Image (cartoon, rainbow, N blue to C red):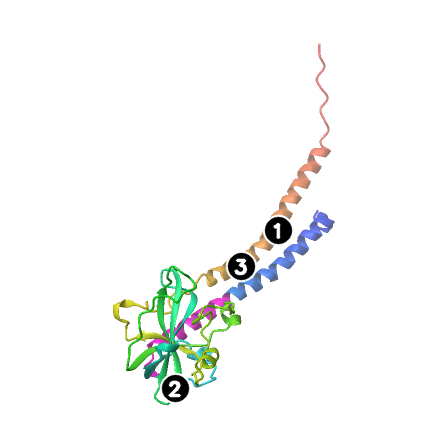
Amino acid sequence: MYRFVLTRQWVCLTLIALALIPAMIKLGFWQYHRHEHRVAQNELIAGNLSAKPVPVTEVTSPGHQVPRSDFWRAVTATGTYDSAHEVVVRMRTDNDDKVGFHVLTPLVLADGRVVLVNRGWVAGGDDPRAYPPVPAAPSGEVTVTGRLKADETSGGSGIKDRKGLPDRQVMLINSAQQAQYLGKQVLGGYMELTAPAPAGGSPEPIADPDHDSIGPHMAYAVQWWLFAAAVPVGWLVLVRREKRDRAAAAAAGATPEREPAPTA
């Protein structure tokens, strides 16, 4: 009755179904692990943002690679801005996705070491290769608070570190590169300025990282698992339909044709 499932067509269909089930289950777990990662990252961001700020020199040093556990850590620093060596970071977007620059200003600490401070976003001028209009950094000694971030790399950010850029323009925020430019010891990573707020609202402060949404990964995981469960159900439906169609065809073939009625 079900010998048709041994035909080449049905064997191929069955093998495809058997391959799809574990693949879909694996894809479901992949999305589930992405969900878990997102939840853990949200908890990390929320915890680090709400923690009491600590001096930046307690969590990083020259050549230090900021670990993920310290990303967005609230830190403080006291020093003097070195506006003469300020640079801007190209191809950065504001909170409305407009393209412009981030303003990166060295802050010289009392011991002569430097921490890089991302003061925020500014729009570009008419000439994209010209240095954009940037509000001056506060003069004299200042105390700033910010979020600690790791050095940017092309591999980690996906941003190509282009050469031959205009003067005082860079593609990446990288403490090692800026140490060469400044000729000073620069603390690993950098600070995203959160306080004090800039006069006149420019540079535009960088918004807090999103740590409320969890994304669609859990829904995708459930969908993949439902697809995996639907495969054997669909296979059974097709088998029953094929059996019914074959039985109907066999019954039709076994019924003799009626002779036409004689005419007068």
Furthest residue to the bottom?
111
Residue 171 vertical placement versus 68 (above, below): above
Segment colored magenta: 32-54
Q: In terms of depth relative to the viewer, which is nearer, 52 or 202?
A: 202
Residue 242 vertical placement versus 194 (above, below): above
Where does label 1 land, which residue?
Answer: 236
Which type of secondary structure does the marked residue at label 1 adopt?
Answer: helix
- Quadrant placement of the C terminus: top right
Amino acid type indicated by mark 2: Thr
Examine the residues drawn in magenta and state their main secondary structure. Answer: helix
Any magenta on residue 18?
no
Which type of secondary structure does the marked residue at label 2 adopt?
Answer: helix
Give the number of the mark in front: 3 or 2. Answer: 2
Residue 25 falls left or right of residue 5: left
Q: Residues within 10 Å of mark 2 (few under 14, many from 20)?
A: some
Q: Which mark is residue 224?
A: 3
Q: Position of residue 175 (x, y in %)?
A: 45, 79
Closer to the chain start, of discs 1 and 3, is 3
CA gap between label 3 and label 2 equals 47 Å
Q: Position of residue 67 (x, y in %)?
A: 46, 80
Residue 147: in sight, yes or no?
A: no
Give the number of the mark in front: 1 or 3. Answer: 3
Amino acid type indicated by mark 3: Trp
Hey, which quadrant is residue 212 in on the image?
Answer: bottom left
Q: Position of residue 172 (x, y in %)?
A: 46, 71
Where does label 2 land, which residue?
Answer: 57
| Residue under the image location 36 percent in, 60 percent down | 96
| Residue under the image location 50 percent in, 62 percent down | 221
CA gap between label 1 and label 3 equals 19 Å
Hey, which quadrant is residue 72 in on the image?
Answer: bottom left
